Image: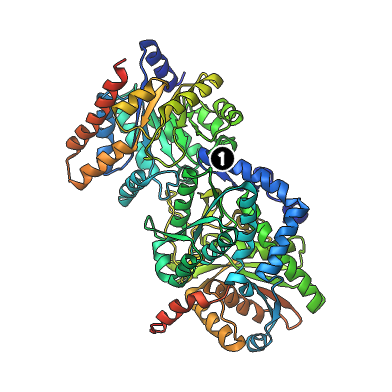
């Protein structure tokens, strides 16, 4: 059983929902990524989505675009990102780590080489934004053979038929994009999300994580009421950007990000 | 070589040209692409739609465009006879309008009140703003901030036509960044908006659709060649940025294996300097902007900056069908430097009284080299894809003149 699956099962038994933060690896320094990951866990995160920086992040809003630019300024590569995961695993063997990003860096490394390195580094899942299931026929079995979950997106525009197809192809969890738009968009409609998530849960036993538009304890807890996981990205990335512009130390940056996670954790667990 | 008749039928139902093409986009756009694919599949075979398209091309664009024998230039060069397919004479001054007419008709059929576009040199932006004005559609054009600077004339044309021009400051501030931003707008406004992609790239069905709309160039050139010379041309030459004018010229000749095809990429300061925009000549396959194709990228899969004197060729990718034609060997891809293109611009202007776009000047420069290696009985068709008025500021700047 994959680390993601068993983790969700344990949460379920405890009656808790997963808090899933996203940060871009190498933002703002490669050295700050592993300490940030540990802080996220200590503050109450369940699964970490670690962003692989890309020069052309088409599905992302300004916050994550700038995070990618900061990470690429000092040349953060996919190899560097995998090294971060391996380092994180030296002291944490329980928190699932999902790599999130765009296809091209993986394509250029080569799929077999990537799958092997990702597995040996301790990666549990991969979410490639621009790889829909239709184009993943060769990639998915390769990931599977290395016990890596392939996580797909679902969107408000996804039809019922496609929802079914995507859930059949995915493993680990499915990521429901709560709004039509790029990351960092505002305005999440909690009622609409509740309806959509229920419809997805009708189609699959996979846990449903919801992302886009979650920025504080209140939105996190409203989503936690209806979904299995709460995914939060841009608000953390903005805090990291602010820390960089103020020249804060790695420790201070970690504290700043931890405070956001703790608030969300508390709000989600308050039921 | 692969089966040419089969290749002419590509892409397959999922938009693949061999390993290239496909649909590599985030999930939010998949249903819009499904809808567009299905609509286009119907319209492609709908006589009423085709008649409407043909009527617009005839009466609004001014087609057919002439196939002009450049006699004086041919004499000057020495070698094969050079014919120019005069896409520069189209309404709005380039081949781009063939495609925007077609896509705007689709937008109308889908009932979308708003269109968006990306643009490099501004020709596609102008062509989109033009058809939007004519159909009463809201129009927003994304343009790299650097291109806004060097193509000021086209920016103002778009504004006069009622379009909003959005300068894109992200990344390298050129065409690829404009395309990223247009994709982001589309994801956000997918219900109301039709994205008119300007080149034969992007997710399926765009590469096929843009090719089909521009194939009128090759169909006419084929017929005109037979009429004027009694035979098919021996070679076709067209510039390749994303590659829409080239694929439009090439495609109707794919099965004519006596016709050689040359796509001319922007060699910038020279391939050896790395300062160019020639993914087919010096790049490798990858995935960007919804399709798998040759790209300019580094060893980590990051897209790298490009350089060309012509904004319309300043793009790190290329349409997936060109990638396929390169691999099968059906078409050859070469490059021409900024300086060679500028020289061709001046030469055609002075010898034939035709001022070509800097993009098209790349094709002209290569045709000149090619003609010299051929005999006077042979013929070359060069796609003169656009007129050079928009580039006068660039040329004047190089000459140290302020206009």
Name the spot of residue B217 as percent of width and height, x first: 69, 67
Locate residue A124: give its quadrant: top left
Task: In the rendered view, tell whether residue A19 sits above or below residue A153.
Answer: above
Q: Which residue is mark 1?
A: B30
Q: Is residue A190 visible?
A: yes
Q: How is the image coloured?
A: rainbow
Image quadrant containing the C terminus of chain A: top left
Q: Kindly give the residue lying farthest to the front in the view shown.
A: B136
Q: Chain of mark 1?
A: B
Q: Kindly give the residue lying farthest to the top in the view shown.
A: A13
Task: In the rendered view, tell whether residue B163 sits above or below residue B9.
Answer: below
| Nearer the observer, B83 or A35 | B83
| Nearer the observer, A165 or B265 | A165
Name the spot of residue B275 as percent of width and height, x first: 43, 66
Q: Is residue B321 left or right of residue B50?
A: left
Task: In the rendered view, tell whether residue A70 sits above or below residue A192.
Answer: below
Name the spot of residue A53 as percent of width and height, x first: 38, 44
Secondary structure under the numbered disc 1 in the rendered image = helix
Name the spot of residue B330 as percent of width and height, x first: 69, 61
């Amino acid at each position: 059983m994959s680390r993601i699956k068993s983790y969700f099962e344990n949460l379920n038994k405890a009656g808790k929902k997963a808090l899933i933060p996203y940060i871009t690896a190498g933002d703002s320094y490669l050295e700050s990524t592993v300490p940030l990951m540990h802080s996220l866990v200590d503050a109450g995160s369940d699964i970490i989505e670690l962003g692989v920086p890309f020069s052309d992040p088409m599905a992302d809003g300004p916050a994550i675009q700038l995070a990618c630019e900061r990470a690429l300024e000092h040349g953060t590569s996919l190899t560097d990102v995998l090294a971060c995961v391996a380092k994180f695993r030296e002291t944490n063997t329980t928190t699932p780590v999902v790599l999130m990003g765009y296809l091209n860096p993986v394509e250029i490394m080569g799929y077999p080489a990537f799958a092997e390195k990702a597995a040996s580094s301790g990666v549990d899942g991969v979410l490639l934004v621009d790889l829909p299931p239709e184009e993943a026929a060769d990639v998915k079995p390769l990931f599977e053979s290395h016990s890596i979950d392939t996580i797909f997106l679902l969107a408000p525009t996804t039809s019922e038929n496609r929802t079914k197809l995507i859930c059949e192809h995915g493993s680990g969890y499915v990521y429901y994009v709560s709004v039509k738009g790029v990351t960092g968009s505002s305005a999440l409609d909690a009622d609409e999300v509740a309806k959509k998530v229920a419809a997805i849960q009708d189609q699959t036993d996979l846990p449903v994580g919801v992302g886009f538009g979650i920025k504080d304890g209140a939105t996190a807890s409203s989503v936690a009421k209806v979904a299995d996981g709460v995914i939060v990205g841009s608000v953390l990335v903005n805090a990291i950007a602010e820390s960089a512009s103020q020249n804060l130390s790695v420790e201070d940056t970690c504290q700043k990000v931890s405070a956001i996670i703790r608030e969300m954790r508390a709000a989600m667990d308050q039921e | 070589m692969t089966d040419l008749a089969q290749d002419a039928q590509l892409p397959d139902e999922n938009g693949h040209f061999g390993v290239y093409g496909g649909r590599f986009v985030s999930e939010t756009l998949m249903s819009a692409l499904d809808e567009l694919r299905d609509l286009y599949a119907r319209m492609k075979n709908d006589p009423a739609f085709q008649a409407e398209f043909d009527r617009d091309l005839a009466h609004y664009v001014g087609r057919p465009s002439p196939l002009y024998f450049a006699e004086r230039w041919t004499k000057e060069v020495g070698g094969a006879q050079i014919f120019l397919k005069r896409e520069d004479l189209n309404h709005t001054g380039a081949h781009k309008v063939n495609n925007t007419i077609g896509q705007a008709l689709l937008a109308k059929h889908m009932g979308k009140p708003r269109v968006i576009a990306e643009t490099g040199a501004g020709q596609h932006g102008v062509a989109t703003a033009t058809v939007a004005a004519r159909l009463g559609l809201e129009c927003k054009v994304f343009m790299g901030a650097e291109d806004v600077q060097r193509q000021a004339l086209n920016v103002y044309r778009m504004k006069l036509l009622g379009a909003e021009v959005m300068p894109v400051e992200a990344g390298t501030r050129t065409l690829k960044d404009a395309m990223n931003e247009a994709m982001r707008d589309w994801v956000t406004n997918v219900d109301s908006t039709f994205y008119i992609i300007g080149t034969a790239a992007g997710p399926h069905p765009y590469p096929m659709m843009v090719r089909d709309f521009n194939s009128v160039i090759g169909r006419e050139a084929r017929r005109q060649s037979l009429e004027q010379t009694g035979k098919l041309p021996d070679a076709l030459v067209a510039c390749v940025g994303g590659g829409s004018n080239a694929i439009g010229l090439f495609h109707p000749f794919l099965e004519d294996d006596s016709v050689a095809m040359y796509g001319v990429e922007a060699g910038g300061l020279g391939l050896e300097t790395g300062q160019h925009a020639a993914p087919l000549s010096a790049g490798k396959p990858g995935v960007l902007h919804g399709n798998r194709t040759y790209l300019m990228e580094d060893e980590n899969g990051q897209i790298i900056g490009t350089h060309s004197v012509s904004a319309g060729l300043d793009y790190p990718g290329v349409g997936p069908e060109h990638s396929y034609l390169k691999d099968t060997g059906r078409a050859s891809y070469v490059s021409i430097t900024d300086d060679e293109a500028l020289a061709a611009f001046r030469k055609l202007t002075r010898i034939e009284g035709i001022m070509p776009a800097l993009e098209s000047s790349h094709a002209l420069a290569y045709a000149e080299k090619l003609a010299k290696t051929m005999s006077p009985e042979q013929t070359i068709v060069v796609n003169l894809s656009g007129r050079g008025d928009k580039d006068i500021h660039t040329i004047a700047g190089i000459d140290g003149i302020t206009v």
